[in-house]
Image (tube, rainbow, N blue to C red):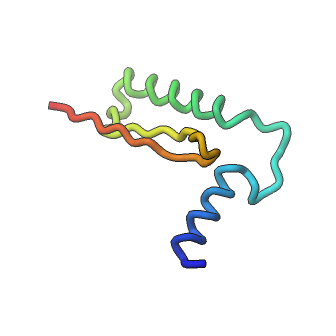
């Protein structure tokens, strides 16, 4: 296995939560991500941080793999 293939394989296992024992008391990642987004929006409104020029999100495709989609926002 090549280094790049190994890296992708490890990343895929990490995303699936298969590298370490999972704590059943932890909230789902989707809830944590939503809390982070809400906090970030609050900080943007308060002027404490700037809005990102790029946004990304992770999604699960039909092939059962996870991918990241990056959306670029061009500000004038």
User: Residue at the location (69% across, 50% down)?
Assistant: 16
Near-viewer residue (29 or 67):
67
Which residue is nearer to you in this view: 56 or 3? 3
Q: Position of residue 25 (x, y in %)?
A: 84, 37
Q: Nearer the viewer, residue 52 or 67?
A: 67
Q: Position of residue 32 (x, y in %)?
A: 64, 33
Query: Residue at position x 30%, y 38% from top?
Result: 72
Q: Quadrant of residue 75?
A: top left
Residue 46: horizontal and vertical position, in percent?
A: 38, 22
Q: Residue furthest bottom?
A: 2
Could you tell me which residue is drawn at 59 percent across and 40 percent down?
62
In this view, the residue farthest toward the front is: 63
Indicate whether 23 appears above or below 44. below
The image quadrant where one finds the C terminus is top left
Q: Residue at x 34, y 40 (%)?
A: 54
Q: Is residue 57 above or below residue 43?
A: below
Residue 69: where, in percent of width, then height? 44, 42
Q: Nearer the viewer, residue 32 or 56?
A: 56
Residue 28 position by quadrant: top right
Which of the image's four quarters has the N terminus?
bottom right
Q: Is 64 on the left-hand or right-hand side of 59?
A: right
Q: How many labels were placed on the picture? A: 0
Left or right: 29, with 66 as reference point: right
The quadrant where residue 9 appears: bottom right
């Amino acid at each position: 296995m090549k280094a790049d293939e190994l890296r992708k394989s490890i990343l895929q296992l990490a995303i699936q939560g298969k590298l370490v024992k999972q704590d059943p008391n932890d909230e789902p990642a989707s809830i944590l991500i939503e809390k982070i987004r809400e906090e970030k929006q609050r900080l943007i409104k308060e002027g404490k941080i700037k809005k990102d020029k790029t946004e990304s999100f992770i999604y699960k495709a039909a092939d059962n793999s996870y991918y990241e989609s990056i959306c670029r926002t061009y500000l004038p």
